[in-house]
Image: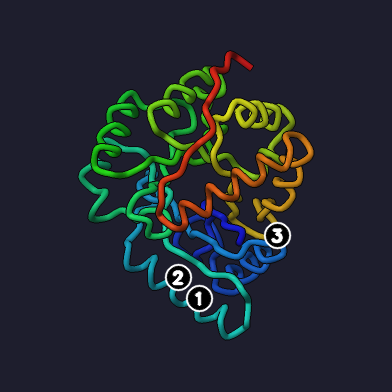
Amino acid sequence: MLVDLHNHILPGLDDGPDTELEALLLIQNAVHNGVTHIVATPHHRNGVFNQDINEIKDSIHTLNLLLQEREILVTILPGMEVRLHADLLDELASTTLTIAGSHKYVLIEFPTHHIPQFTESIFYEMQLKGYIPVIAHAEKNEEIRRHPKKLFNLVTKGALVQVTAASVTGANGKDLQRFVLKLCQHNIVHFIASDAHGVHIRPFLIKQAYQVIEHKLGKNFVNYFQQNANHVLNGVEFQVFQPALIGKI
């Protein structure tokens, strides 16, 4: 079982595919990468897209039926990529989807340039309510790249971290690749995910990413990241590697 926890495959809901055909082509791209379970995570509350839970579920149901008709062996599951905002705590139970219906893990997107000042307090309150924040594509945040210790601090307080397959492979640049691999070496990363948007632009590169991880860091890291994703899919908590303090990179 190979799980992808972060992507944009639902047609017409955000900046992913526009049509069902484009979505099916992207899903086939995922299958070629060995993916068996795709958690669809359309953007939510990012200033452009606001999602409706039922619309997401309906879209997933339609796609799963099409996949069954075509005998494409992959399962789509619900989720959201939720931009961190001040009212998040009030919306968690009503207008937010957890990852794969886990009722526990929430994929959280930071702004590109900074970490909001209320991040620690919201993450703390989330965890008191039984939720676990998963920081989406953490390596893309400029403040985290300048001050990786701030990401380390969030991890030591219970947050989990996802990085993007394209950053691991070097498709997003060699500097970002070096940064991501350093985060992995220091046990500050818990998941590799595609963040796929389209077949030609930002496709699934998760197979290639795991090949890089195995070559650079070893098979144990591959197993760790894949098993972590499986645990999230099953909605269970799991033991993470002890994070190590990291300085400027």
Q: Quadrant of the rendered structure where residue 100 is? A: bottom left
Amino acid under label 3? Asn
Check the picture and name the quadrant holding the C terminus: top right
Could you tell me which secondary element the residue under label 2 belongs to? Answer: helix
Above or below for 220 versus 249 = below
Disc 1 element = helix
- Along the polypeptide, which appears first: circle 3 or circle 2? 3
166 relative position to 40: left or right: right
Amino acid type for the residue under numbered disc 1: Asn
Q: Nearer the viewer, residue 86 or 189?
A: 189
Name which residue lies at 54% across and 39% down: 190
Q: Which residue is mark 1?
A: 64
Residue 225 percent location from the top left of the image: 59, 44
Kindly report the distance in space between the C-alpha atoms of the residues bearing marks 1 and 2. Answer: 6 Å
Q: Nearer the viewer, residue 98 or 56?
A: 98
Tell me which residue sits at (70%, 57%) in the image. 200
Q: Residues at badges 3 and 1 in contact (C-beta under 8 Å)?
A: no
Label 3 sits on residue: 33
Whole-angstrom CA distance, mark 3 to mark 2, is 20 Å
Circle 1 residues within 10 Å: few <14, some 14–19, many ≥20: some
Tell me which residue sits at (42%, 27%) in the image. Answer: 154
Image coordinates of residue 177 in percent, x first then y, are 70, 32
Q: Earlier in the sequence, mark 3 or mark 1?
A: 3
Residue at label 2?
A: 60
Q: Looking at the image, do the residues carrying marks 1 and 2 touch, with CB atoms under 8 Å apart?
A: yes
- Vertical order, 12 against 142 (above or below): below
Please provide percent x and percent y for residue 149: 50, 18
**Residue at point 55% right, 21% down?**
244
The amino acid marked with disc number 2 is Ile
